[in-house]
Image: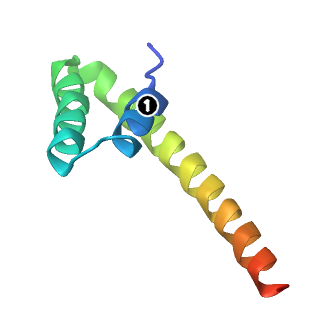
Amino acid sequence: MPQYDFKKYHYRSINAATDAERAAINQELKDLYNSLPDAEKDDFNSQLQTFLAKEMGRLKSNYESVKGNLGDN
């Protein structure tokens, strides 16, 4: 099964200048999903969930680090 580069979409979305640009990027990802054979869609979803879980964990860790540093001041 192919590996999907969700990080590419994520960073493009973070750096989008407008909500419309962000929506277009999200639509690209949806179009990619819709173009997949049914046999690959479960793997796509699994890889996406893994990416999102890792990304949310990273964001939580960064937040807690910043929050802890602010509490020291």
| Residue pictured at 70% horizontal, 62% vertical | 61
Left or right placement of residue 36 versus residue 44 in this view: left
19 relative to 16, above or below: below
How many tags in the picture?
1
The N terminus, quarter of image: top left
73 relative to 68, above or below: below
x, y percentage for residue 16? 31, 41
| Residue pictured at 48% horizontal, 32% vertical | 7
Observer-nearest residue: 24 or 36?
24
Residue under circle 1? 6
Occupied quadrant, residue 23: top left
70 relative to 19, above or below: below
x, y percentage for residue 57? 62, 57
Mark 1 residue crowding within 10 angstroms, few (<14) / some (14–19) / many (20+): some
| View extreme (right): residue | 72
Q: Which amino acid type corresponds to the residue marked 1 in the rendered image?
A: Phe
| Residue pictured at 71% horizontal, 77% vertical | 67
x, y percentage for residue 9? 37, 32
Occupied quadrant, residue 66: bottom right
